[in-house]
Image (cartoon, rainbow, N blue to C red):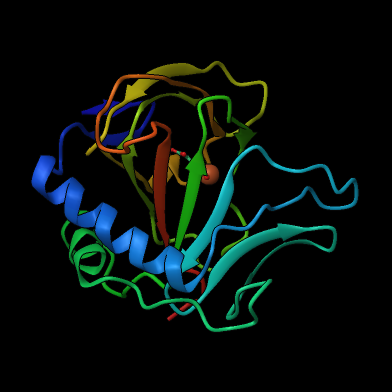
Amino acid sequence: MNIAGVKWLPGHFGPQEQSRLLELVRAAVRQAPLFQPVMPRSGKPLSVRMTNMGRLGWLSDRAGYRYQQTHPVTGNPWPEMPQMLLELWHEVSGYAHPPEACLVNFYEASARMGLHQDRDEEDLEAPVVSVSLGDTAVFRIGGLERKSPTSSIRLQSGDVVVMGGDSRLCFHGIDRVVPGTSALLKDGGRINLTLRRVTRP
Ligand code: SIN
Ligand code: FE2
């Protein structure tokens, strides 16, 4: 399905695959605990907590947005990118080289993500591929300018979104998470996995 140039694959992962992905995320979080990112300069906390898998991880702190090879708190390299996510990328990205980063965002019931563009990558030829797990989220998609008109879709557990081509730099964000919409996470909330190619091959 195509929404504002973004490819939406509802229910791409079935319940068993969602549970497997959740296990992989839990294993990664044991090794690389969720941390609380803050906004550059202001130091205001984002409402999501995050960690990463893969060679590079994205983070935000007072010094700015960036990718780095180590966890900001433990100083250790990020856990490996799971095979299952490499396979997803291969299947849906239409891009020949593997992703280098998988950002893991954890949303509590009250968390949200303001409209933004993903533009910290050198390689903008590769799409951004994202997976939703847990409670449904209201995902807002706009155009190439902050003031462009937007539309919204409800991303459910197992859905995959591919932002590539003309939609690669679209503004997007999460308006809210809808509590009680999935039983995958025992205590509710939502996990979003975002796969990205960072460097030019
Ligand atoms: C993001 O744009 O970083 C996250 C999108 C999502 O949570 O679905
Ligand atoms: Fe994003």
Residue positioned most to the front: 186
Asked if one can make out residue 100 in the rendered structure from this viewpoint, the answer is yes
Q: Which quarter of the image is occupied by the N terminus? A: top left
Residue at image point 36% right, 32% down: 5
Residue at image point 39% right, 34% down: 187
Where residue 124 appears, x then y in whole percent? Answer: 49, 60
Asked if one can make out residue 101 in the rendered structure from this viewpoint, the answer is no
In this rendering, the answer to whether 74 lies above or below 190 is: below
Where residue 27 appears, x then y in whole percent? Answer: 34, 67
38 left or right, relative to 142: right
Where residue 35 appears, x then y in whole percent? Answer: 62, 58
In this rendering, the answer to whether 201 lies above or below 109 is: below
Quarter of the image where one finds residue 180: top left
Residue at image point 38% right, 48% down: 164
Front residue (pair 137, 152): 137
83 left or right, relative to 72: left
Front residue (pair 196, 178): 178
183 left or right, relative to 113: left
Count of marks placed on residues: 0
Quarter of the image where one finds residue 6: top left
Residue positioned most to the right: 41
Where residue 201 appears, x then y in whole percent? Answer: 42, 81
Residue at image point 66% right, 28% down: 146
